[in-house]
Image: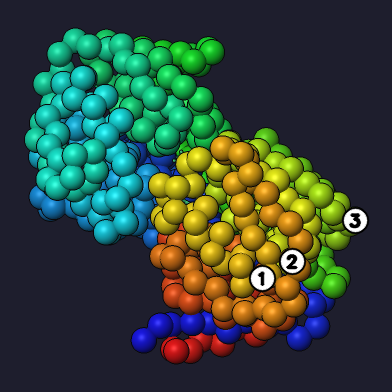
Amino acid sequence: MIQTVTLSHPTGVLHGTIQLPASKSEANRALIIAALAGGNSTIENLSEANDTQLLQRLLKSDAETIDAEDAGTVMRFLTAYYAVTGQQKTLTGTERMCQRPIKILVEALRELGATIDYLQEEGYPPLKIKGFKGNGSNKLKVRSDISSQYISALLMIAPLLPDGLELELEGKIGSRPYIEMTLSLMEHFGVSATFEDNSIVVPHQNYKTATFAVEPDWSAASYWYSIVALAKEAEITLPGLKEDSYQGDKAIVDIMNRLGVYTEFTASGITLSKKHCEKRVAFDFSHCPDLAQTVVALCAALGVTLEMTGLESLRIKETDRIQALQIEVLGMGTSLNEMTPGVFRMEPAILTKRELTFRSYQDHRMAMAFAPIALLETVQIQEPNVVRKSYPGFWQDLEKVGFSVINNAE
Ligand SMILES: O=C(O)C1=C[C@@H](OP(=O)(O)O)[C@@H](O)[C@H](O)C1
Ligand SMILES: C=C(OP(=O)(O)O)C(=O)O
C-alpha cells in the first residue's frame, strides 16, 4: 500500500510566517565536535530532522551495531569519529546507504592508522571499524570531487591526531561551502586551521567546550521560495535566516531573484515577495547541490528554459537525483537532457497532458521540491513521510498557509 498526500491550494494567495527547521548540516557537525571536545557544550535550536535526532541517539549508544539509516553525514561522520576514538563498531544503513560510496574516506582513515573492513561490497557500507593505531602519518591526498562529507569527516577528527593533519584536495572541490562550514564550526569550538588553494592544515590541538546556536535551514527555505514563485500573490516571512550564514544554500537568494522572488533581509530574518521572472536561466550547482531539485521542479512548473551544470554529486545521494528528476519532469510535459557531458537542459513543456503524481524515491528533497506545484493544480506526492529526514513538519507548515493536505493510501 503506497502512502500518498494530495495537495491543493484554493486561492493561490499566501501570507504567513514560517519557523523553519534548524540546519541538519550545522547540527550534525556541532554534535560530533561537541562529542570530541568532551565536557559539556550546549547546542541550542538542535534540529528536529531525523538525521540529527538519529546522530544524537547514536553518539550515546553503546551498541556494537550502529544503523545510520539514510543519513549520509551520520554514516560518514561516525566512520571517522569511531575510528579516531578507537571504538569497535559495525556501521550500517539502509539499502540505499549501502550503495553510497565511502571508499575515499575509508582509505584515508586506513592511511592514518585505522583498521576498517568492508562487510559486503568493497568501497561501500556496511563497515566494521576495528580500531586505530596512529602511525605518524599526517599528510593525505584526498579526492574532493565526489563528496565534501569525506573531507569534513577527516577535518573534524584532525586536531586529535598526534601531529594534526595536512590535507591536499585532489580534483574539483565540490560542495565547498560545506567544507567551510566545518572549519567555521571547528573554530567556534576553539580549533584553528588554514585553507589555502587546495591545501587544508589542522595542527594538533584540543577542542574547547562552547555554546552553539544552530541556524534555520537555508535548504528548507528553498521550498518556500518556490511556493512564493508559484503563488498568485504571496508574502512569506522566515525568521532567523541570516545573510552571513555558514550555509552555502543561501545561494537560493540570487537564484530565486531571477525566478520571481525578492528577498528582503530584516533584523529578524527574511521576507519573500513576488517580482518579475526571467524566461531563460542557467545555474551551476557545484556548491549548492541540494537546491537543484527545487529549481528543476519550479522551472518545469513556470515554463522557464533551464540550463544546469555541477550536478555530478546528485548521482550518489538519497537516490540518483538526476535520473529521478528526468523521470518526474516527463509527467509535466518536458524533459531534462544532458546536452554535453555535465551540461543539462530543460525546455518549457510542450504537452498539455499532465499526470501530477510524483514519486519521492525515498528522497525528502524530491517530495518537497514538487509540492509547490500544488499552487497550479492538484498534486499527489507518494511516500510523504520521507520529509522527516530534514523537515518533519513540512506538510503541517503547508497547511498553515492554506494548502489542503489530505493523507491517503493508494
Ligand atoms: O556536509 C553536509 O552536511 C552535506 C554535504 C552535501 O553533500 P556532498 O558533499 O556529498 O555534496 C549535501 O548534499 C548534504 O545534504 C549535506
Ligand atoms: C544529500 C543529503 O543528505 P546526506 O548526504 O547527508 O544524506 C541531503 O540532505 O540532500
Q: Note whether 10 is above or below 179 in the view shown.
A: below
Residue closer to the observer: 309 or 181 = 309
Tell me where residue 53 appears, x and y as whole percent.
Answer: 36, 57
Label 2 environment density (alpha carbons within 10 Å; few <14, some 14–19, many ≥20): many
Q: Mark 1 and 2 residues: CB-CB less than 8 Å, in contact? A: yes
Q: Residue 160 occupies which quadrant of the picture?
A: top left
Q: Earlier in the sequence, mark 1 or mark 3?
A: 3
Q: Label 2, label 3: how many angstroms apart (C-alpha)?
A: 20 Å
Residue closer to the observer: 335 or 192 = 335
**Circle 3 residue:** 276
Residue 162 seen from this side: yes
Please tell me the numbered disc located at residue 128.
Answer: none
Q: Note whether 186 is above or below 303 in the view shown.
A: above
Tell me where residue 248 appears, x and y as whole percent.
Answer: 60, 38
**Circle 1 residue:** 332
Does residue 93 appear to the left or right of 29 in the view shown? left
* Quadrant of the drawing holding the C terminus: bottom left
Q: Amino acid at mark 1?
A: Met
Residue closer to the observer: 325 or 369 = 325
Q: Amino acid at mark 2?
A: Ala
**Circle 2 residue:** 349
